[in-house]
Amino acid sequence: MATLTLPKHSLPSLLPSQTPRTPFSQSLSFVSKSSQSQFFGLTFSFSSNLPIPSSTPAKTSIVAKVNKGQVPPSFTLKDQDGKTVSLSKFKGKPVVVYFYPADETPGCTKQACAFRDSYEKFKKAGAEVVGISGDDTPSHKAFAKKYKLPYTLLSDEGNKVRKEWGVPSDLFGTLPGRQTYVLDKKGEVQLVYNNQFQPEKHIDETLKLLQSL
């Protein structure tokens, strides 16, 4: 007769124990705002060392601070020749202030040359054209000379004026925005136009408004 021999274990030893045999810390960290709780003899320590993901997505505002009907903050910046220019200099005549990302980039060059090619139309409308970017004065001077730009380029190093006017950025904040403002003779904004990827449209829209004033 065959005999079946079982290992010498007591029945409780074959059952899972509620107390872990392998030593480990009984303090586990979880992301929570609670302090402590008990669960099967283990002490769970809760802390808020890690950020708690919010179920509400972060809101990114692209609304400019300067809107139609408002008088924008004044500024004093240096032009491509190193001369100081203030916004108040243009009061009494319409002025087109266009913010652009940078000198010598394809879109900005196209926009600058489009303003140049239509400059006589702006003059006929009695308006001045002013371009603003974060480039320094030497960069503006070289840019204006290379493309024979007949209007003023102002250096807003540090983008202080851009921030004060609330010009929104593009591509999740990685690219300075391309935004154009038309101010009337009283210095009030009559048009705010934003179009990053069709730079020539800025000229069409501004001329259309100026010719209606």
Image (cartoon, grey):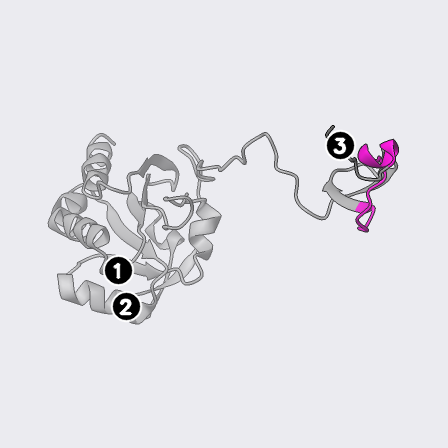
Question: Depth-wise, is mark 1 or mark 3 nearer the camera?
Answer: 3
Q: Is residue 12 left or right of residue 157?
A: right
- Mark 2 nearby-residue class (10 Å; few <14, some 14–19, many ≥20): some
Give, as a single range, the part of the protein colored magenta.
Answer: 10-27
Q: Is label 2 in a helix, a strand or a loop?
A: helix
| Corner quadrant of residue 63 | top left
Residue that numbered label 2 is attached to: 139
Q: Position of residue 33 (x, y in %)?
A: 77, 37
Q: Residue 33, relative to residue 133: is it above or below?
A: above
- Mark 1 nearby-residue class (10 Å; few <14, some 14–19, many ≥20): many
| Rendered-image quadrant of the N terminus | top right
Residue that numbered label 3 is attached to: 4
Q: Position of residue 29 (x, y in %)?
A: 75, 45
Q: Is label 1 in a helix, a strand or a loop?
A: loop
Give the Cα distance between marks 2 and 3: 94 Å
Give the Cα distance between marks 1 and 3: 90 Å
Q: Is label 3 in a helix, a strand or a loop?
A: loop
Q: Can you see residue 81?
A: no
* Residue 18 falls inside the magenta stretch: yes
The structure residue drawn at horizontal position 39% and vertical position 52%, both measured from the top left corner, is 88
Q: Can you see residue 13?
A: yes
- Disc 1 vs disc 3: Cβ atoms closer than 8 Å? no
Which label was assigned to residue 103? 1
The dominant secondary structure in magenta is loop
First in sequence, mark 2 or 1: give its number. 1
Along the line of sight, which residue is nearer the eye, 25 or 106?
25
Q: Label 3 amino acid?
A: Leu
Q: Is residue 83 left or right of residue 128?
A: right
